[in-house]
Image (spheres, rainbow, N blue to C red):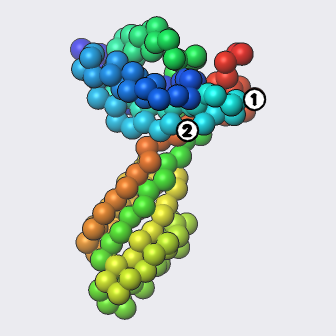
């Protein structure tokens, strides 16, 4: 049996209603779960960059790439390989902070992880953190003993290192 692992696919798509639905529907129809997806305007007006993380073996991912290339609104599809990319994710985490000691401990972790406190209330602190998924996972694990109230994560976004780009003319 082929080994499954996470794959990152970068796509350039038309920036219009229905494109995200069509891409996610392709995954649904084939029984693949999208682990994370982030979409935003690309450097060219009218286009968007979609970064998709999906779990599967190499053969499955090859099929996903072929199927994505068949979609009308998809301009370009590229598999990104971990050794040649920079990835980041953003998370906002709200935790209980009921006393001075817990607030102090949380703020120390915030400093160590280069996060930022973005909201303070009498009973909680809210932080934002950016970095790799592993870094965010580690930070959330350290926050669990304080009582994590809410977590919102953006999903991975990624670009190729160096001069290489995922653009429509390359």
In the displayed structure, would residue 98 be above or below residue 54?
A: below
Q: Is residue 19 visible to us here?
A: yes
Q: Quadrant of the N terminus?
A: top left
Binning the other alpha carbons within 10 Å of mark 2 as few (below 14), some (14 to 19) or many (20 upward) gives: few
For residue 40, the mark is 2
Q: Is residue 70 left or right of residue 164?
A: left
For residue 163, the mark is 1
In the displayed structure, would residue 58 be above or below residue 93?
A: above
Viewer-side residue, 79 vs 37:
37
Residue 78 placement (x, y as % from top left): 55, 20
Q: Quadrant of the C terminus?
A: top right
Residue 108 placement (x, y as % from top left): 47, 78
- Indicate the secondary structure of the residue bearing disc 1: loop
In the displayed structure, would residue 156 be above or below residue 11?
A: below
- Indicate the secondary structure of the residue bearing disc 2: strand
Residue 26 sits in quarter: top left
């Amino acid at each position: 049996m082929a080994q499954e692992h996470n794959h990152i696919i970068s796509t350039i798509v038309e920036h219009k209603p229905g494109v995200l639905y069509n891409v996610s529907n392709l995954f649904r129809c084939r029984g693949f779960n999208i682990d994370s997806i982030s979409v935003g305007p690309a450097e060219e007006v009218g286009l968007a960059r979609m970064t998709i993380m999906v779990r599967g073996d190499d053969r499955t991912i090859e099929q996903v790439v072929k199927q994505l290339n068949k979609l009308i609104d998809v301009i370009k599809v590229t598999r990104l390989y971990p050794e040649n990319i920079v990835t980041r994710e953003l998370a906002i985490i709200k935790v209980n902070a009921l006393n001075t000691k817990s607030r102090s401990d949380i703020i120390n972790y915030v400093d160590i992880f280069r996060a930022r406190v973005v909201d303070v209330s009498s009973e909680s602190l809210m932080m934002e953190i950016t970095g790799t998924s592993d870094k965010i996972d580690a930070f959330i694990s350290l926050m669990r003993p304080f009582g994590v109230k809410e977590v919102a994560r953006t999903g991975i976004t990624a670009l190729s290192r160096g001069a290489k780009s995922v653009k429509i003319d390359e």
